């Protein structure tokens, strides 16, 4: 499995498929449209009867129809959105055009930005260490943070952040209702304990 070769492709909203010419950890997407990076095992590709377009369509449907918030951002201190799925409109009220090219940090609650900065520092440190070794360090982080919706309300997100083709892949669930229920239960327990 370690010597298994992979083909990297990028799936875009416009049904374009971009095959990366130099699939490495340093590959860059030089297309104007945002996309989802997909690594396909060469062995699987040869054995599969599905065409590349069928595979593309499956992953496109997953990304575009998922109830989770899915985004790609630059892997730097700006966290510029390069891709967002339609759940950003459904859950947070933002049109795609309102997010692409903007810093994700501008939407994150000030108290939670330090958590994001810590992940960025961990990523930059792992990149520096990767340069010293031939192994790619694992980079997956789970984090809860607050994000501002278009109407000015804060949502609690439970997110998994990973790295894909030099960008952050952020997959999030809106856990706002759960957080409010937990806070209500906590207040109720405090009031009950004070009563006795």
Image (cartoon, rainbow, N blue to C red):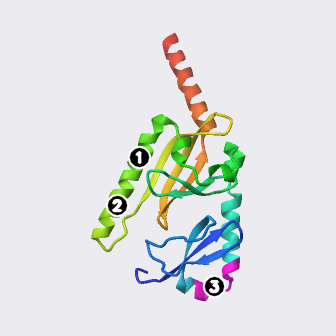
SS for dot 1: helix
Residue 141 position within the rendered picture, expressed as x and y whole percent measured from the top left: 44, 53
Q: Is residue 123 left or right of residue 62?
A: left
Q: In the rendered structure, which segment of residues is drawn in magenta?
A: 45-53
Q: Assess whether residue 162 is covered by the magenta stretch.
A: no
Q: Assess whether residue 52 is covered by the magenta stretch.
A: yes
Residue 188 position within the rendered picture, expressed as x and y whole percent measured from the top left: 56, 21
Residue 11, by quadrant, is bottom right
- For image coordinates 57% across by 50% down, the residue present is 102
Q: In this view, does 4 lie above or below 111?
A: below
Q: Is tag 3's residue or tag 2's residue first in the polypeptide sequence?
A: 3
Q: Answer yes or no: is residue 196 visible.
A: no
Name the front one of labels 3 and 2. Answer: 2
Q: Residue most toward the left?
A: 132
72 vs 97, nearest the viewer:
97
Q: For the residue carrying disc 1, how many other residues have a C-alpha within 10 Å: few (<14), some (14-19), or many (20+)?
A: some
SS for dot 3: loop
7 vs 101, nearest the viewer:
101
Q: Mark 1 points at which residue?
A: 117
Residue 81 position within the rendered picture, expressed as x and y whole percent measured from the top left: 57, 54
Q: Mark 3 points at which residue?
A: 48
Residue 139, by quadrant, is bottom left
Q: Is residue 182 above or below residue 93?
A: above
Q: Is tag 1's residue or tag 2's residue first in the polypeptide sequence?
A: 1
Q: Is residue 150 left or right of residue 129?
A: right
Q: Is tag 3's residue or tag 1's residue first in the polypeptide sequence?
A: 3
For the N terminus, the quadrant is bottom left
């Amino acid at each position: 499995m370690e010597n298994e070769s992979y083909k990297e492709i990028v799936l875009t909203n416009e049904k374009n498929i971009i095959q990366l010419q130099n699939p490495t950890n340093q590959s860059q997407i030089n297309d104007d449209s945002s996309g989802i990076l997909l690594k396909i095992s060469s062995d699987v590709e040869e054995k599969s009867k599905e065409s590349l377009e069928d595979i593309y369509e499956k992953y496109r449907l997953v990304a575009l129809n998922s109830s989770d918030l899915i985004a790609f951002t630059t892997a730097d201190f700006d966290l510029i959105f390069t891709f967002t799925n339609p759940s950003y409109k459904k859950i947070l009220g933002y049109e795609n055009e309102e997010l692409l090219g903007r810093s994700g940090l501008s939407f994150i609650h000030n108290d939670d930005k330090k958590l994001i900065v810590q992940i960025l520092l961990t990523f930059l440190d792992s990149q520096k260490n990767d340069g010293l070794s031939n192994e790619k360090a694992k980079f997956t982080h789970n984090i809860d943070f607050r994000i501002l919706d278009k109407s000015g309300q804060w949502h609690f997100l439970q997110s998994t952040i990973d790295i894909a083709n030099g960008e952050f892949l952020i997959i999030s669930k809106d856990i706002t209702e759960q957080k409010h229920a937990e806070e209500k239960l906590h207040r109720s327990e405090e009031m009950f304990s004070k009563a006795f």
